Amino acid sequence: MEQPRLFEFRMGDRSPDKLVVAEANRDAAKLLTDWRAWPHGALALSGPSGSGKTHLALAWALEVNARRISALANAEDAASIFRESDGRLLIDDADAERDEGMLWRVLDLARSQGGALLLVGSQPPSAWRVETPDLRSRLASLPVAKLGEPDEVLMDVVLRRVCREQFIQLSDDAAKYLVRRLPRTFAAAQAWAAALDEELVRGARPVTTAIAKRALEKMQARWVGGDG
């Protein structure tokens, strides 16, 4: 079945060549594609580190012409940008330090005037530490698009991405070897990449199965030793 056009474009050197819609992110992709149907004009996007939350969110923002604003923006500036962008806003890292007055204001605007407000964080909003009771209640009621851990297809993409971020190429044989042996988590892919960075002899292109195996063994030894 043809995947949504929303995610079929290049996102730069730090992303996969194409954002792949796979088991781990299919439900989230569907919810982002159906942004006009978000209850009260807002949606939260959550997932583990490295799961592609920001990539998906930026893809959505580019597709619908949404404006990205800081979680620390003040309420008046945010309200002005909300109106200028027809209510289409993206706030990344919304579960970190934020202006609660601003967040309450844009949620209220999306609810009362209609809009499409996307809040991105590692945890769903119900788990965020929020001081303002009314804001806490509104956040807890938001629908959430959750990104899961990668399946085999997405794990291959993630491994190639983390290698590309180090300006190296992962051979097809090495990628297949790793996909069969690494735990299917984004944390494992990142831990392997850290071990690879120490193991890699600069100038070795591409990463062979032997190099990938040594990095994997180093990563596993650390995890067994309690450092992972």
Image: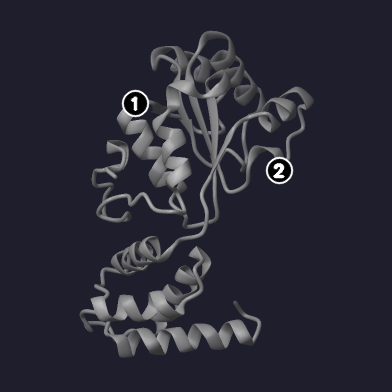
Q: Position of residue 150 (x, y in %)?
A: 46, 61
The residue furthest front is: 1
Q: Is residue 178 left or right of residue 226?
A: left
Q: Quadrant of the C terminus?
A: bottom right
| Residue closest to the eye, 141 or 118 | 141
Could you give the CA–CA distance between mark 2 and mark 1, rounded to whole angstroms? 28 Å
Residue drawn at x 68%, y 29% as measured from the top left:
141
The residue nearer to you, when weighing 3 against 201, is 3
The relative height of residue 205 versus residue 50 in the rendered view (above or below) is: below
Q: Is residue 197 visible?
A: no
Report x, y in % for residue 225. 64, 87
The vertical placement of 79 against 66, above or below, is above
Is residue 21 shown left or right of residue 90? left
Q: Residue at x 67, y 30 (%)?
A: 139
Q: Residues within 10 Å of mark 1 (few under 14, many from 20)?
A: some
Q: Amino acid at mark 2?
A: Ala
Q: Which residue is mark 2?
A: 127
Residue visible at 41% across and 78% down in the picture: 180
Under circle 1, the secondary element is helix
Q: Is residue 114 above or below residue 116?
A: above
Q: Is residue 157 above or below residue 227?
A: above
User: Earlier along the polypeptide chain: callout 2 or callout 1?
Assistant: 1
In the rendered image, residue 75, in percent from the top left (x then y), is placed at: 58, 19
Image quadrant where one finds the N terminus: top left
